[in-house]
Amino acid sequence: MQDEALARQAMDECESLLQPDWRPEFRIEMLRSRSHLADSQGDLDAAIALRQEAVRVARDVFGDWRLEVIDATCVAELQWRAGRHAEAAKLLTAITRKCGFGRL
C-alpha cells in the first residue's frame, strides 16, 4: 500500500511539473503510468478510461497514429481482461482497418 501511495505521489508531482507548451508525449506517459497503477490495484474501469484518454491525446492533440495504436491496443487488452470481449474485438478490428490491414 505504501508503494502505491508513493507512486501516486510521484505521479502527482510529475504532472504538476508538466508545462502546457511541452510535447504531448509527457502527458501520454503520465496517463499510461496512472493506468498501470489503476490496473495493479484491480481497477480495470479506471485503467481503461485512462488509456482511452491516452488514445485521444495521441490522436487529437499529437496526431501520432503509432502512439494511438499502442494505447488503443492496450485499451483492447484491458477490455478483454474486464470481460468486455465484444468491445475489445470491435476496437481491434477498427485498429487493423485504420492501419490498412483490412481483415486478419
Image: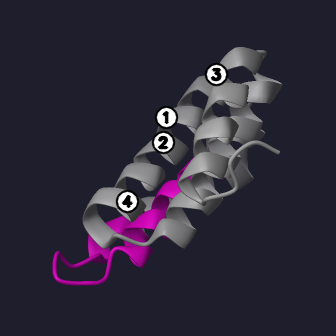
User: Taking 94 as reference, is 36 left or right?
Assistant: right
The residue carrying mark 4 is 59
Residue 87 falls within the magenta-colored stretch: no
Q: Is residue 53 visible?
A: yes
Residue 16 falls within the magenta-colored stretch: yes
User: How would you rate the neighbour count of disc 3 (Cα within 10 Å): few for under 14, some for 14-19, many for 20 or more?
Assistant: some
- Disc 3 or 1, which lies upstream in sequence? 1
Residues at marks 2 and 1, CA–CA distance in whole angstroms: 5 Å
Residue at image coords 17%, 75%: 20
Place residue 79 in its image quadrant: top right
Q: Are marks 2 and 1 in contact (CB under 8 Å)?
A: yes
Q: Is residue 19 above or below residue 44?
A: below
Q: Quadrant of the C terminus?
A: top right
Residues at marks 1 and 4, CA–CA distance in whole angstroms: 15 Å
Q: Residue furthest front?
A: 102
The residue carrying mark 1 is 49
User: Taking 53 as reference, is 103 left or right?
Assistant: right
Residue at image coords 68%, 48%: 102
Q: Nearer the viewer, mark 1 or mark 4?
A: 4
Q: Position of residue 7 (x, y in %)?
A: 61, 59
Query: Tag 2's secondary structure?
Result: helix
Q: Which mark is residue 52?
A: 2
Q: Main secondary structure of the magenta part?
A: helix
Q: Are marks 1 and 4 in contact (CB under 8 Å)?
A: no
Q: Are marks 3 and 1 in contact (CB under 8 Å)?
A: no
Query: Tag 3's secondary structure?
Result: helix
Name the amino acid, label 2.
Answer: Gln
Residues at marks 4 and 3, CA–CA distance in whole angstroms: 19 Å
Q: Which mark is residue 60?
A: none
Q: Residue furthest left?
A: 20
